Amino acid sequence: MAKTLLRSGCLDDFLSLGENGQTVFDSALQIRETLRLRKQQAVVDSLAIPQPNDEGDRVDWYAPFEGSVVSWAAASDEQRKKALRYLDNCQANIASLIQRCQQAEKTSIQLFGSLLANTLQFPGSPHVYLVDGKPVITFWGFVTLNSSARPDPLDCLRIAEEHEPVIEFLPEPPPAAPPVVVLSEPDEPLYSVAALTPVASQNDEPLVSAPEAEVVRETPVTKKPKRWLPPVAAAIIACIAAPLSYYLVSAPHAEPLAQKQAEVKPQTIAPAAIQAAPVAHVSTLPVTQAAVVEPPAPEPEPAAVTTTTPAAEIPKGALVLPADSLKIGSTKFLNGNWRVAINVKDSITGKPPTLRYQIANNKGNVRLVHGDNIVCKAEVFSGLMQSGTLMIKTRGNARCSDGSRYPLPEISCKPGENDVAECSGRYEEDTVVPVTFKKVGD
C-alpha cells in the first residue's frame, strides 16, 4: 500500500499517452507488476503509485516506499546529478526490455513494449520527487496539453553545463611615433615701409608742382516766385464776401417763438346721458345662488401588467444542440471531453456511475472507474438522425482491467429549452434512465 502522498491533480489538465487505444495510465498497475516480475525493481521504485478517486477525474500519487521527501527544485546539485544517473540507468533497462518485447511473437507482449516506450514520459521537473534520495516520478505516462512526447524523457532534468569564459589576451599595440613638427617659412608682409628720402637742403632748388585744375561749382537755378497770385486771390474773396454780407444785414429779424405762441384755454366736455335699456321679461322666481357641482374625476385605468418570464440560464458546461448545426448535420459541438452522469446505482458500489467520454469527429472512447480501482474502457461513435436526435453508441460492453465486462447504455439526446440537450440512456433490458452531460475539457 502507498505510504506517502506526493502529488494530486486533475486528469483533464494533462494528455495521457498510449498505444492502440490503450493508455499507459489505464494499465499503470499492470505495468508496475510486470516490471517487478521481470526483476526491474529499480524501475518499479521510480514510478509512483496512482490512486484515482471515485469519479475518476482526479488521481493521487503515492511513494512506493517510505522516506523523507524533497522536491526536485529544493534538491541540491549533487542530489540532482545522483538522481539523474539513477534515472538514466532505468531508461537504459527499459530500452533493452522494449527491444525484447518487440521481437516477441505474442501481440500482447508487443503491446506491452509499446506502452513501455511512454512510461518514463512526464509533464516536467515539478512532478519528480526525491524519496530517501531516490527519484520518484508522478504523472508518468502523461505530458502537458498541446504537446507531444519528448525524444528524451529526461531532457527537462538535465542541467546545462556552464562553460568557463575564455579570456583572450590581445597584444599591446606598438607605441605611436611622435609627431614631426615642420616649421614653414613666415609669410611675407602685406605691405612694406618705403625708405625715407633725405630732406633737401634750403639751398636746393624748389620743386615745381603741377598746376591744380580749377573746380567750377554749379550754382542752383532758383525759380522766380509768382508774385501775381496773392492779389488775384484777394480780389476773388472780396467779390464773394460783399453780396453775402449785404444779404445778412438786410434780412428781417424773426420774432421770438414765445410771443407768437397763442395761449390755449382748456374746454369742458359735458358727459353724455346714460339711458337704461328696457327689460323685455322679468322673472318672478326667487333668485338663489347656484351650487357648482364638479363632475366626478375619471378613475385611472389600471396599467396593463406585463409579465415577462426570464430566460432560463444555460448551466455551465452543459451540452447544447445548436439548431444551425442540426440543420446541416454537423456534430462539432460534441468534440471534447465530457463527464456523463447516469441516474442509476451501480450494483457493486451502490453509487451512480460516472463515465468519461472523449469524442472527436464522431469517434472516441469512454472510460469508467469503479470498485477497487477497476478501469473499464470501450470505443464509442456518434451521429445525427434525420429527426435531429443525437445518438451515442458503444461497440459492445466495456472491457475492464480485471477481465470483466461492464454494460454501457445507448444515449440519445434531443434539444430542449435554449437548445440544452435532454438525454436518456437505454440498456439492453429496455431500461431508460436520465443522462446528464457536462464538458470538462476541449
Image (cartoon, grey):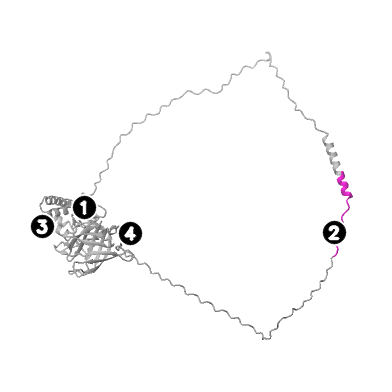
Name the quadrant containing residue 289: bottom right
Contact (Cβ within 8 Å) of mark 1 with mark 2: no
The residue where tag 2 is placed is 257
**Between marks 4 and 1, how big is the CA–CA gap?**
57 Å
Residue at the spot x=86%, y=58% of the render?
256
User: Please, what is the three-letter code of the amino acid marked with disc 4?
Assistant: Asp
SS of the residue at dot 1?
helix
The residue where tag 3 is placed is 37
Residue extending farthest to the front is 280
Foreground residue among 255 and 30: 255
| Residue 3, image x, y percentages | 18, 63
Q: Which mark is residue 80?
A: 1
Residue at the spot x=84%, y=41% of the render?
237
| Residue 367, image x, y percentages | 21, 61
Q: Residues within 10 Å of mark 3 (few under 14, many from 20)?
A: few
Would you say residue 261 sits in the magenta stretch? yes
Name the quadrant containing residue 296: bottom right
Which residue range is magenta in the image? 242-263
Image vertical order of residue 122 relative to residue 221, above or below: below
| Residue 59, image x, y percentages | 22, 62
**Between marks 1 and 2, how big is the CA–CA gap?**
133 Å
Q: Nearer the viewer, mark 4 or mark 1?
A: 4
Q: Nearer the viewer, mark 3 or mark 1?
A: 3
Q: In terms of sequence position, does the residue under pointer 4 or pointer 3 come before the other?
A: 3
**Between marks 4 and 3, how big is the CA–CA gap?**
56 Å
